[in-house]
Every structure is written in structure tokens, then in C-alpha cells.
Image (spheres, rainbow, N blue to C red):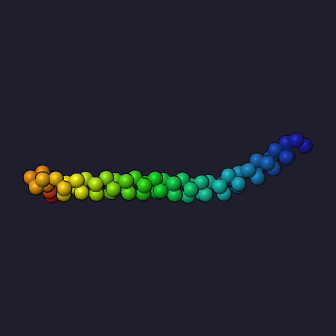
Amino acid sequence: YSSSPDSCVRTRKRPRNRGNKPRHGLSTDASVAKFLLDRILLFVAMVAAEINAACSTPPSLRELITHCCE
């Protein structure tokens, strides 16, 4: 008698877990994508700051930087 409720509980739990796994996967993908986007935006901001700094430096250093970047 006690074994039949266990089997019912087990069979009920399995489909629920399967149903949740894709949702968890999507949420983690979204959080990873957001994290990567934040990192990219931060990197772009840093590069922009470097370019601004390079443009405000004396011409010799600016020429050196543009030569290295080509």
C-alpha cells in the first residue's frame, strides 16, 4: 500500500522536472546574455575612453597609437 503512493509521486515529479528544465535553461541563457552584453558595453566604454584619451594626447603619441592600431 505504501509503495504505490511512492511510485505515483515519482512519476508525477519526473514530468514536472522535465517541464522546468527548459525554463531554467532559458533564464540562465538570458542572464548569461545580459552579463555578456554588460561586459561588451563596459569594454566599448573603456575603448571609447582610451580613444578619447589618445585624441587629447600630443600628436606624436596619437600618431604612434594610430600606427599601432592599423
Which residue is at 51% across, 54% downward?
A: 31
Which residue is at 23% across, 56% downward?
A: 51
Q: x, y percentage for residue 23? A: 61, 57
- In the rendered image, which quarter is residue 15 located in? bottom right
Counting the numbered discs, the total is 0
Q: x, y percentage for residue 32? A: 48, 53
Pick out the residue farthest to the left: 60
Q: x, y percentage for residue 54? A: 19, 54
Q: Is residue 69 visible?
A: no
- In the rendered image, which quarter is residue 63 located in? bottom left
Which residue is at 33% across, 57% downward?
A: 44
Observer-nearest residue: 38 or 2? 38
Quadrant of the rendering where the N terminus is positioned: top right
Q: Is residue 32 visible?
A: yes
Which residue is at 73% across, 50% downward?
A: 13
Q: Left or right: where does residue 60 sit relative to residue 19?
A: left
Pick out the residue farthest to the top: 2
Q: x, y percentage for residue 47? A: 28, 54
Q: Left or right: where does residue 46 sit relative to residue 1?
A: left
- In the rendered image, which quarter is residue 38 located in? bottom left
Observer-nearest residue: 57 or 46? 57
Q: Left or right: where does residue 43 sit relative to residue 30?
A: left
Quadrant of the rendering where the C terminus is positioned: bottom left
